[in-house]
Amino acid sequence: MTDRSTEDLAQQLVGDLAPVKPIARMRSVGSLVVALSVVAVVATGWMTGNWPRVGEAAFWSDPIAVAVLLGLMVAAAGAVVAALASAIPGREPLARSGGISAGLAAVWSIGCGLRAAVGGESEFAASLLAGSASCFAHALVLAVPAALAVSFYLSRGAPQQRLIASAAAAAGAAGLGAVVVHLTCSAVGGFHLLLGHCLTPLVAGLLFALPLAGLVGRWSPSAFES
Amino acid sequence: MGDEREVRWRSWMVAAQAGETPAYEKLLAELIPYLRRFVQRRLLNAAAAEDVVQNVLISIHRARGTYRPERKFSPWLHAIARNAIIDQTRQHARRSRREVSLEADGVAEPPSDPVEPLGQRLSPELEDALGALPDSQRQAVELIHLHGYSIAEAALKVGATKTALKVRAHRGYRAMRAHIEALRLEESGG
């Protein structure tokens, strides 16, 4: 217990008051994240010549490829929503819903990848790992702008669990990258699908939660101006 | 929460975001008794409840930019209060598991009555150890253990985060302990 009254503290806070700009709407930041991802796709497509195969009939005729695409899309969107909502007190139910959707969708896409891996070729060569690592790295490059935008939003907000929010930000941004990679990559094979595409959001969430949490802390404005 | 009160608090909060101190003053004045009831219904320890209310006020102040004017005020307020209660419960559980008494480490623990300034009652040994600390650590130890400020209040006073202040204080205790042990070793001719 303290020797200073709560009313004194309130007076101190009133004295410390400075104007603040209300945090941006989640919807605006969500749109910004999508726009940044599109810019990243165009930039890497222009530099590497790899463009999404959205118009190819071969892609849409493969049910597992389509199922993985759906799973990755829901996982990415759910994780981004979870991260953004966790920045705002009172939006915890939305954060939870986003997190649950992302988790279920990640399980779904990993399950599809596993099914393709088990039912597909049995060869597990070093070249397969290299190809998967390349897709993973490509997804991460595409994820950078979205990850930075969500982290900046988190730094302006008040996430109760900064590490978990950062993990969701990393998973969501990497999920967006994985969606593009999945649409771009022409490699076939169940193991590649699993390692290079389906596991990307999960692995990125685990690997980059801590660095992003550090970034969020570093970007947070000083709590008290005085 | 009544609709009228909801509207009133929302408009005061919006005004506070624009930097209008009278509106903020009115808002906090109305929030304090409301938060006391809210917290006391959820916490048995009345002393801890007052600490939580203070932490909620500080959290409101720090997170005031996260309130969106088009949304209801009460879910935002309740979420902050609930988070503060959860923090308090976790801290209490951690403290009861891990807290190491300063006395057990050879450092006199400050008496529980925080009203009387303790600085005048420090032993020369403690004063010496305290004086040897870097300014930031000495300030943290003094505010929390000599002047009876809560972590949140002390953090507010020095313009640091609660975590940073706890780290400074912890480093200060360790340095004081090492200093006292070294003094005793010297005295015993070791």
Image: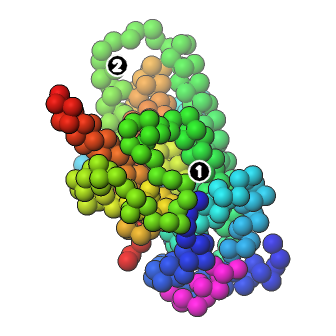
Indicate the position of residue A61 as horizontal and vertical percent values: 57, 32
Q: Nearer the viewer, mark 2 or mark 1?
A: 1
Q: Which mark is residue B87?
A: 1
User: In the picture, residue A223 is in which quadrant?
Assistant: bottom left
For image coordinates 38% across by 76% down, the residue present is A225
Indicate the position of residue A10 as horizontal and vertical percent values: 57, 77
How busy is the neighbourhood of tag 2: few (under 14 within 10 Å), some, or many (20 plus)? Answer: some
Chain letter for mark 2: A
A82 within the magenta span: no
For the question of whether residue B79 can be seen, the reply is: no
Residue bearing the label numbered 2: A128
Which residue is outermost to the top?
A122
Given the image, on which type of amino acid does mark 2 rest? Leu
- Magenta stretch: dominant SS? helix
For image coordinates 37% across by 34% down, the residue present is A136
Indicate whether A91 appears above or below A107.
below
Q: Which residues are magenta?
A: B19-30
For image coordinates 55% across by 63% down, the residue present is A2
Indicate whether B8 appears above or below A150.
below
